[in-house]
Image: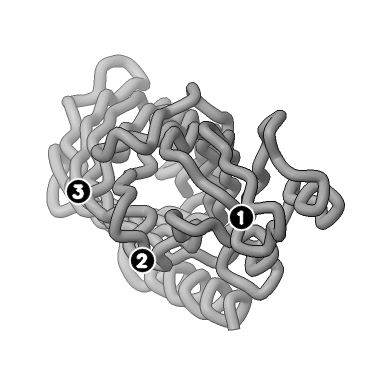
């Protein structure tokens, strides 16, 4: 189903590129630096993690100075944090209390960024731009790993270093006071900018940066923890 959706939207963007002279279609790749912004003191960010994104982009020029920009991206957003509230694993018969657990999350999203793009006049072969908008995302796969020196041996034997948090794989690592399941929807505002190098015809190379600040709680099912996964991205692409 995921591949069919991506293919359908890709074909739609391609058809539009031939139907409209003011529409351009292209490819994009990006590296992102993700972190967790905890609004609850039980979640403590543990630095940035590198992820990536790739996909299609298209833009419709309303005039020479502004237009609409849209993308279809497969993005991997990583984050790591410490869970500082005292916990115990439900399946641990010894009921060992652990004061700090380190989590690393790897989440794959289907992102659909939509933004308004503002351009400068062409300076030589260069055009500078800024854009702002929103980027709804849908979680396709979410994996986590748990590390701590206090994890009971019975839990270590089950290997909590790489498991799907939203599937049955995560049941063995359920805690008494934290639900690690990830909310399937993500909605950030985005702001960024960059430079475009005009080549022959309508073809151009593009490089830019973007900050994505989400408003949705990553752990919406958990009533004690509140955290948001944000990222800063650096991208390159080509428009035809």
Mark carried by residue 127: none
Q: CA distance from mark 2 to mark 1?
A: 18 Å
Q: Earlier in the sequence, mark 2 or mark 1?
A: 1
Task: Check disc 2: other Cα within 10 Å, few if <14, some if 14-19, many if 20+.
Answer: some
Q: Are marks 1 and 3 in contact (CB under 8 Å)?
A: no
**Quarter of the view holding residue 197:** top left
Q: Nearer the viewer, residue 160 or 114?
A: 160
Q: CA distance from mark 2 to mark 3?
A: 27 Å
Q: Nearer the viewer, mark 2 or mark 1?
A: 1
Residue drawn at the location 59% of the way across and 39% of the way down: 104
Q: Which residue is mark 1?
A: 89
Q: Is residue 179 above or below residue 159?
A: below
Q: Are marks 2 and 3 in contact (CB under 8 Å)?
A: no
Residue 176 at what x, y percent from top left?
49, 58
Task: Check disc 3: other Cα within 10 Å, few if <14, some if 14-19, many if 20+.
Answer: some
Q: Nearer the viewer, mark 2 or mark 3?
A: 2
Q: Is residue 4 above or below residue 235?
A: below
Residue drawn at the location 27% of the way across and 49% of the way down: 188
Q: Nearer the viewer, mark 1 or mark 3?
A: 1
Q: CA distance from mark 1 to mark 3?
A: 41 Å
Residue 106 at what x, y percent from top left?
60, 47
Q: Which residue is mark 2?
A: 221
Mark carried by residue 133: 3
Q: Nearer the viewer, residue 217 or 196?
A: 217
Q: Nearer the viewer, residue 203 or 30?
A: 30
Q: Earlier in the sequence, mark 2 or mark 3?
A: 3
Residue drawn at the location 80% of the way across and 47% of the way down: 156
Task: Check disc 1: other Cα within 10 Å, few if <14, some if 14-19, many if 20+.
Answer: many
Q: Residue furthest top?
A: 124
């Amino acid at each position: 189903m995921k591949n069919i959706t991506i293919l359908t939207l890709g074909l739609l963007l391609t058809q539009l590129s031939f139907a409209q002279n003011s529409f351009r279609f292209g490819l994009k790749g990006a590296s992102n630096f993700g972190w967790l912004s905890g609004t609850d003191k039980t979640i403590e960010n543990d630095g940035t993690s590198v992820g990536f994104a790739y996909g299609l982009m298209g833009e419709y020029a309303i005039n020479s100075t502004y237009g609409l920009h849209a993308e279809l991206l497969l993005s991997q957003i990583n984050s790591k944090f410490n869970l500082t509230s005292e916990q115990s694993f439900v399946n641990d018969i010894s009921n060992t209390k652990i004061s700090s657990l380190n989590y690393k999350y790897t989440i794959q999203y289907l992102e659909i960024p939509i933004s308004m793009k503002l351009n400068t006049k062409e300076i030589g072969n260069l055009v500078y731009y800024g854009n702002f908008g929103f980027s709804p995302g849908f979680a396709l796969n979410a994996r986590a790993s748990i590390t701590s020196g206090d994890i009971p041996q019975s839990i270590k034997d089950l290997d909590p270093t790489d498991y799907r948090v939203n599937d049955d794989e995560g049941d063995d690592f359920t805690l008494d006071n934290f639900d690690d399941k990830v909310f399937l929807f993500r909605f950030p505002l985005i702001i960024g900018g960059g430079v475009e190098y005009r080549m022959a015809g309508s073809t151009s190379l593009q490089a830019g940066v973007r900050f994505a600040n989400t408003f949705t709680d990553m752990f919406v099912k958990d009533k004690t923890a509140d955290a948001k996964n944000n990222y800063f991205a650096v991208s390159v692409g080509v428009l035809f």
